[in-house]
Image: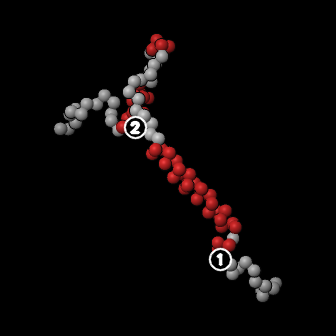
């Protein structure tokens, strides 16, 4: 075997190899997409719904979306549904 032969690519810096940029491009695209998603979420918040929408068929069947609406509003505002501000805490 000939040990005197040196690869012409051995002395080049890392940024000269295309494979390095291909490996770095995937995570970079994911980070950019995460920031774009965060921007969209911050600038377009969901509105808090005040009235639970119901239609006549659901009312006759006793089906309502109240628990889902309360959970959605709690997630948006942080307030518990039906809780009063002066309610006593347990252990007081």
Instruction: Residue at the far front: name it.
Output: 43
Residue drawn 65% across the image and 67% down it:
20
Residue drawn 51% across the image and 52% down it:
35
Residue drawn 69% across the image and 70% down it:
17
Q: How is the image coloured?
A: secondary structure
Instruction: Residue at the far top: name it.
Output: 60
Q: Does residue 8 lie above or below 43 as drawn? A: below
- How many neighbours does mark 2 have within 10 angstroms: few (below 14), some (14-19), or many (20 or more)? some
Q: Nearer the viewer, residue 65 or 4?
A: 65
Mark count: 2
36 horizontally vs 22: left or right: left
Separation of disc 1 and disc 2 at Cα?
50 Å
Q: Label 2: state its secondary structure.
A: helix
Residue 14 screen position, x and y as percent: 64, 74
Q: Label 1: state its secondary structure.
A: loop
Residue 7 screen position, x and y as percent: 75, 80
Q: Does residue 28 lie above or below 39 as drawn? A: below
Q: Which residue is mark 2?
A: 76
- How many neighbours does mark 1 have within 10 angstroms: few (below 14), some (14-19), or many (20 or more)? few
Q: Which residue is mark 1?
A: 13
Q: Does residue 56 lie above or below 28 as drawn? A: above
Residue 85 screen position, x and y as percent: 24, 33
**Residue 61, can we see it?**
no
Residue 27 screen position, x and y as percent: 59, 58
Residue drawn 28% across the image and 31% down it:
83
Q: Quadrant of the C terminus?
A: top left
**Residue 81, can we see it?**
yes
Q: Does residue 80 lie above or below 66 as drawn? A: below
Q: Of the residues under marks 1 and 2, which one precedes in the sequence? A: 1
Q: Quadrant of the N terminus?
A: bottom right
């Amino acid at each position: 075997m000939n040990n005197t032969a040196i690869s012409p690519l051995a002395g080049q810096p890392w940024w000269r190899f295309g494979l390095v940029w291909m490996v770095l491009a995937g995570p970079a695209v994911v980070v950019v997409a995460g920031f774009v998603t965060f921007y969209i979420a911050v600038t377009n918040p969901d509105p808090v719904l005040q009235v639970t929408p119901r239609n006549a068929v659901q009312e006759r069947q006793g089906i309502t979306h109240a628990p889902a609406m309360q959970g959605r509003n709690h997630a948006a505002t942080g307030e518990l549904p039906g809780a009063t501000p002066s309610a006593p805490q347990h252990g007081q």
